[in-house]
Amino acid sequence: MIPLTPHLLPLTPYTRCILDGRIIVITSGKGGVGKTTATASIGAALAMEGKRVVVIDMDIGLRNLDVVMGLENRIIYNVVDAVKGKCKIKQAAIKDRRIENLYLIPASQSDNKNVLSPEEMVGFREIISKEFDYVLMDCPAGIERGFENSVAAADEAIVICAPEVSSVRDADRVIGLLYARSITPKLVVNRIVPEMVERGDMLNHSDVVDVLSIELIGLVPMDDQVVVCTNTGMPLVLQKKSLAGEAFRRIALRINGMADLPIEVPQSQSRFWKKLGTRLGLGK
Amino acid sequence: MFNDFLKKVMGSNKSDSREVAKKRLKFALIYDKLEVSDDILNALHRDIVEVISRYFEIDHDAFKLDIRRSDDFSALIVNTPILSAKHKDPRHSDL
Ligand SMILES: Nc1ncnc2c1ncn2[C@@H]1O[C@H](COP(=O)(O)OP(=O)(O)O)[C@@H](O)[C@H]1O
Ligand SMILES: [Mg+2]
């Protein structure tokens, strides 16, 4: 058997092999904006594209990604065990039975955030990126140790932001911290309510992009199906009729190389029918 | 300035809380970035005292460093009583 010795390698980004998987942290600063939903959905959609994907719950002590994905009954090992080498990655990674090539490494529920360190995460990154095409890290809220750990392991970042003052402000702060670590983050605006945007009662996506000035990779509407899927543990991206699911699928395609795929702006039903009417030549 | 703006927006009958949100957000981010951490202020305090001390005898305890903000600008305010001038040419000092 060949022993694993990645800890002995110099750990600069440049030592990483081209064949290594991409490690992407999903973060936001503020809680409740959709990091966990986005991690589960983008992860599932990437796996549906035929990639080997692992999603990792970095919210130590407050795990949630497992229930969102409906895999809570199958947990044996967790990310702390995997990082500390108490189990093999194969043992910690729970295989999703509905979507091929999708795996979850859950957070540990009994430890506290300080049980892991950024140094350990850098070591872990070298191991995990050898086994998967994509590693998505679901970052906890805040900018303390849990954030540090998630970011230490990542090469790329997606910032999730809701079109609200507090969320955008926190996103701005997190973007600054990511730049300080030489990561250029990309933006997803989630929880858009088109009716409110159209009547001028919600920041629109260009307001948000304007303020944060980073590259936008997706716009996700508020969608009841998100809650319905979380109730049942079904993957949102398998719901053909879910607008949020569709938005996350498109984000995954964009991440996975289709950089030119147009970003669709969520629209209200009334606006949608009006436009369709105009296109079909019915009225003005 | 900001209040005028709020009045203008609130006064119009069209609901447009989005404009208010955007404006407030921009102000908030500007203020956030002007905020200086205690560590930086302490280091600055130390450095300024060191530089001034090359030229003047100053009262270290009375030395005050402050950041004052108003609507349009921020100012760094340094206030120190001078006890006496040092007459040695600082360029030839042994610093
Ligand atoms: N696009 C959306 N439409 C409707 N509900 C959403 C959407 N995105 C997230 N939610 C809901 O918002 C809550 C917080 O989402 P979650 O993904 O847990 O956020 P975070 O991980 O950032 O704390 C959850 O109840 C989730 O179902
Ligand atoms: Mg979460």
Image (spheres, coloured by chain):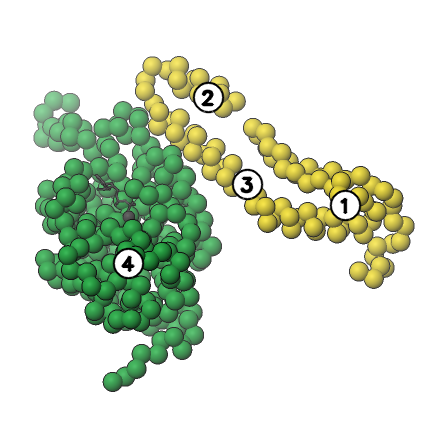
Chain colours: A green, B yellow
Instruction: Name the residue: 10% across, 60% down.
Output: A97
Percent position of residue A34, x then y: 27, 44
- Determine which residue is flagged by label 3: B35
Dot label at residue B32 = none
- Do we see residue A175 in this rendering? no
Tell me, yes or no, whether dots 2 and 1 are on the same chain. Answer: yes
Does A223 sit above or below residue A80? Answer: above
Amino acid of disc 2:
Phe
- Residue lying at the far front in this picture: please name it: A110
Report helix, strand or loop for mark 1: loop
Amino acid of disc 3:
Glu
Q: Earlier in the sequence, mark 2 or mark 1?
A: 2
Q: Name the chain under label 4.
A: A
Does A54 sit above or below residue B77? Answer: below
- Quadrant containing ligand 1: top left
Q: Quadrant of the C terminus of chain A?
A: top left
